[in-house]
Image (cartoon, grey):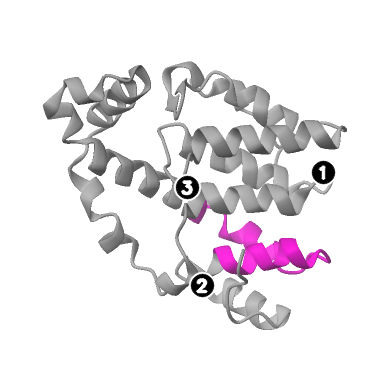
């Protein structure tokens, strides 16, 4: 893995407490990410479940979701991480949500067009009122909720697009589940020459179903 040997380097520089996930401030996310490094398999499994429930709650992404993406990618890229294929599966969920393979080819500009009119402040305001459970008491803010959700999905998707070099490397992994997740991820992003060459070399020309 290139760069820092610590896949969680910079974790504490993210202002998690001021970001929101499905259940409020995301101050618990760093502990969940650290638990993915545990030597105890049940601890890792519980952390994946908790992360799925907070930053990918029923397919919805949140403010905190995009910030989780680089750490999941770095953890999956580190051969000392346990359950790497499951980590990549979680990464796939955060980056793509519940999108199905039959939605390919994918046009992110069209899919995320509603996000263009949402500012950072508006998205944060929606997240705070959702967490407080009083969104419906504020009609103007409630009217922004749908577009804010699209904005968070777009942010997570674009965060995932920054790691295609890793997805290409994972195609060569001996674990077929990990390699399959990598091929599926690559199918959602505009392929470059390295990605195409990796897919051809791996014998995977189409995404592998989850």
Locate residue 195, reporting x and y percent. 59, 72
Mark toward the start of the polypeptide (1 vs 2): 1
Residue lying at 54% horizontally and 18% vertically, measured from the top left = 27
Residue lying at 65% horizontally and 37% vertically, measured from the top left = 49
- Mark 3 is surrounded, within 10 Å at the Cα level, by few (under 14), some (14 to 19) or many (20 or more) other residues, namely some
Locate residue 30, reporting x and y percent. 62, 24
SS for callout 2: loop
Pointers 1 and 2 in contact (CB under 8 A)?
Answer: no
Q: Which disc, if any, is residue 27?
A: none
For the image, the number of numbered tags is 3
Residue lying at 63% horizontally and 61% vertically, measured from the top left = 167
User: In 3D space, how far apart are the residues under numbered discs 2 and 3 (Cα atoms)?
Assistant: 17 Å
Query: Residue 23 magenta-drawn?
Result: no
- Mark 1 is surrounded, within 10 Å at the Cα level, by few (under 14), some (14 to 19) or many (20 or more) other residues, namely some
State which quarter of the image contains the C terminus.
Answer: bottom right
Residue 206 image-quadrant placement: bottom right
Mark toward the start of the polypeptide (2 vs 3): 3
Secondary structure mostly seen in the magenta stretch = helix
Give left or right: position of 61 versus 127.
Answer: right
Locate residue 56, reporting x and y percent. 50, 41
- The residue that disc 2 covers is 192
Mark toward the start of the polypeptide (3 vs 1): 1
Q: Which disc, if any, is residue 159?
A: 3
- The residue that disc 1 covers is 82
Locate residue 45, reporting x and y percent. 74, 38
Residue range of the region highlighted in magenta in the rendering: 159-185
Query: Residue 184 magenta-drawn?
Result: yes
Pointers 2 and 3 in contact (CB under 8 A)?
Answer: no
């Amino acid at each position: 893995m290139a760069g820092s040997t610590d896949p969680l380097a910079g974790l504490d520089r993210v202002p998690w407490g001021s970001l929101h996930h499905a259940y409020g401030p995301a101050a618990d996310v760093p502990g969940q990410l650290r638990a993915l490094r545990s030597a105890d398999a049940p601890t890792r499994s519980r952390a994946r479940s908790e992360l799925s429930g907070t930053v990918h709650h029923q397919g919805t992404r949140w403010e905190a979701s995009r910030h989780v993406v680089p750490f999941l990618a770095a953890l999956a890229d580190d051969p000392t991480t346990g359950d790497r294929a499951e980590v990549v599966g979680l990464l796939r969920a955060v980056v793509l949500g519940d999108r199905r393979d039959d939605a390919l080819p994918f046009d992110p500009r069209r899919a995320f067009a509603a996000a263009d009119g949402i500012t950072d402040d508006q998205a944060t305001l929606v997240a705070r009122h959702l967490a407080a459970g009083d969104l419906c008491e504020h009609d103007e803010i409630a009217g922004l909720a749908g577009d804010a959700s699209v904005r968070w999905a777009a942010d997570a998707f674009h965060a995932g697009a920054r790691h295609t070099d890793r997805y290409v490397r994972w195609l060569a992994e001996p674990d077929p589940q990990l390699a399959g997740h990598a091929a599926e991820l690559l199918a959602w992003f505009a392929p470059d020459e390295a990605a195409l060459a990796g897919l051809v070399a791996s014998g995977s020309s189409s995404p592998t179903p989850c």
